[in-house]
Image (tube, rainbow, N blue to C red):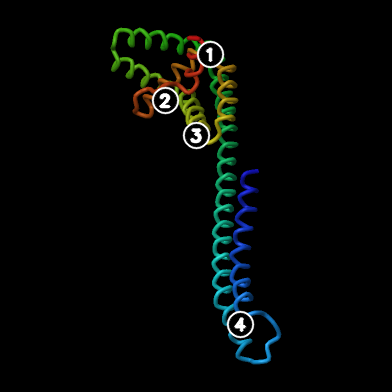
Amino acid sequence: MKYRILKIIISIALLAIVIAPIALYVKKFGFGLWESHDDWAKMGDFFGGVLGTILTTISIVFLAIQIREQSKVRANELSNTISLECDHDVRLYTEKVSSILSEKTVTAILLQTIMHHDALIKENKQEEAKKLIQKYISNNLELSSAWIQVDSSMRKLYELDIRRYLRLRNYVISVMDMGHISFMDSLVSVFSGKEKSSSLFLVEYNKKNKA
């Protein structure tokens, strides 16, 4: 609505810019069917010089606006395409992680690793906890790489499409155990070589529990 009003205001202003020189010329010199070729030539020079320059400037402005709008449309289309791809990847790899963890042996090993990891963290043995995760990653590449894909796609969505991100976050939380999610986030932090930041999944979860 605001954009439409702005377009109307700009159109009226540009129309006024075009009409103003014509009105001034007519007021000063009059307008009619001149008998002299010189009078016609002078009027032609005026309109060609003044109005030609104004109309050229207006055309350039409109062209710049059009190019800008087209760039925005292309950017939105690209963003939407990436968002849809991330949506697909999150669902695909979350199902893959869930499928892998449905095997009792895999889940048992994961739970043992989580407990061992948490114990090391409580004892401030950060390096040993990190090595434990590195060992788990090397022994469970399929599971680890699948979760890394989930995390990567979720972080892109967090920047591109917050509504889709929120829907998918709820989807992942509904499919997976929060303890598993927390530990899998530790895998991502070790894999990326960065300190663990707040989990994209646990932030709102922790807020709700504190409330």
- Distance from disc 4 to disc 3, alpha carbons, whole Å, reads 58 Å
- Please tell me which residue is depicted at 46% across the width and 24% down the height of the picture: 144
Closer to us: 44 or 123: 44
Upstream in the sequence, badge 2 or badge 1? 1
The disc at residue 43 is: 4
- Distance from disc 2 to disc 3, alpha carbons, whole Å, reads 18 Å
Q: Where is residue 10 shown, x and y percent of the image?
A: 60, 56
- Please tell me which residue is depicted at 38% across the width and 10% down the height of the picture: 118
Whether pointer 3 and pointer 1 mark residues with C-beta atoms closer than 8 Å, the reply is: no
Q: Circle 1 sits on which residue?
A: 177
Which mark lies nearer to you, 2 or 3? 3
The disc at residue 159 is: 3
Which mark lies nearer to you, 3 or 1? 3
Tell me if mark 4 has few (under 14), some (14-19) or many (20+) residues whose alpha carbon lies within 10 angstroms of its own: some
Label 2 sits on a secondary structure element that is: helix
Task: Inspect the image, locate mark 2, and give the three-letter code of the amino acid beneath it.
Answer: Val
Whether pointer 2 and pointer 3 mark residues with C-beta atoms closer than 8 Å, the reply is: no
Instruction: Note whether 58 is above or below 71 in the view shown.
Output: below
- Distance from disc 2 to disc 1, alpha carbons, whole Å, reads 17 Å
Q: Circle 2 sits on which residue?
A: 188
Q: Where is residue 114 shown, x and y percent of the image?
A: 42, 11
Q: Farthest front residue?
A: 28
Upstream in the sequence, badge 1 or badge 4? 4
Q: Where is residue 46 shown, x and y percent of the image?
A: 57, 79
Task: Inspect the image, locate mark 4, and give the three-letter code of the amino acid beneath it.
Answer: Met
Tell me if mark 2 has few (under 14), some (14-19) or many (20+) residues whose alpha carbon lies within 10 angstroms of its own: many
Upstream in the sequence, badge 2 or badge 3? 3
Upstream in the sequence, badge 2 or badge 4? 4
